[in-house]
Image (tube, rainbow, N blue to C red):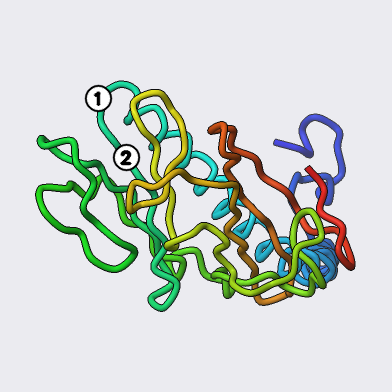
Amino acid sequence: MKREQGLPAMAVAGFTLLELMVTIIILCVLLGLAIPAFSRWIPNYRLRGASRDIYSNFQLAKMTAVRERARCGVMFDVANGRYRLVSSGPNRTFESNATTVSGDDVILKTVDFAEYGSGVGFGHGSATAGVGGAGFDNNVTFDEDGILFDSRGLVFKPSGAAGADGYVYLQNNRNNAYAVGVWSSGVVVMRRFISGSTWQQ
């Protein structure tokens, strides 16, 4: 049919083997360049995701406490690399601690850092000082390893005593770090480690 239209026999559409090989080689080179960049990006992405989840769960605990006119807390189990969002249950009295849920308290959510991958867990990475220049005695600076919100959105210690500002520090396997904190007024903040003792909001 091509000959009948006056076209040479070689004008049939398609790829030659040489064209296909060149395309595959170019794709392999591009993939080889992309994999190292992707492997650097993934741990930071996972760390940022874990930090944002803590930020969101602090906000969720605060909103749950206000909505249910009860107490709701976030408890950090440092030894097991996880944290829990716990509501005070029907009696509206918070009875749990960092490792044990007691009384009629209800676990709303449990987050295990191992599920994020890339070595995400408690830690301050290569930071030399915490937010505000404080030293690192612990990767969770909340008293009693947790924080509690009341029906007005104010902050308390899990034991019920008046609370103070605190932060939880997270790191990945590349020593990058984030800090997520709650001020005594109930404001939730998140900061990213830049260098030395500098944390950026």
Residue 130 placed where, x, y %? Answer: 75, 62
Residue under the point 57% across and 32% down: 185
Tag of residue 88: none
Q: Residue furthest front?
A: 161
Q: Tell me the CA gap for discs 1 and 2.
A: 9 Å
Residue 16 placed where, x, y %? Answer: 79, 61
Count of numbered tags: 2
Task: Tell me the SS state at disc 1.
Answer: helix
Q: Is residue 80 above or below residue 26?
A: below
Quadrant in the picture for the C terminus? top right
Describe residue 129's horizontal placement relative to residue 63 as left or right. right
**Residues tagged 1 and 2 counted as in contact (Cβ below 8 A):** yes
Task: Tell me the SS state at disc 2.
Answer: strand
Q: Inspect the image, locate mark 2, and give the three-letter code of the amino acid beneath it.
A: Cys
Q: Is residue 173 above or below residue 194?
A: below
Describe residue 3's horizontal placement relative to residue 140 as left or right. right
In this orientation, which residue lies closer to the viewer: 171 or 188? 188
Residue under the point 83% across and 51% down: 10
Tag of residue 72: 2
Q: Quadrant of residue 70?
A: top left
Quadrant in the picture for the N terminus? top right
User: Which residue is tagged 1?
Assistant: 68
Question: Badge 1: how crowded within 10 Å, few (<14), some, or many (20+)?
Answer: some
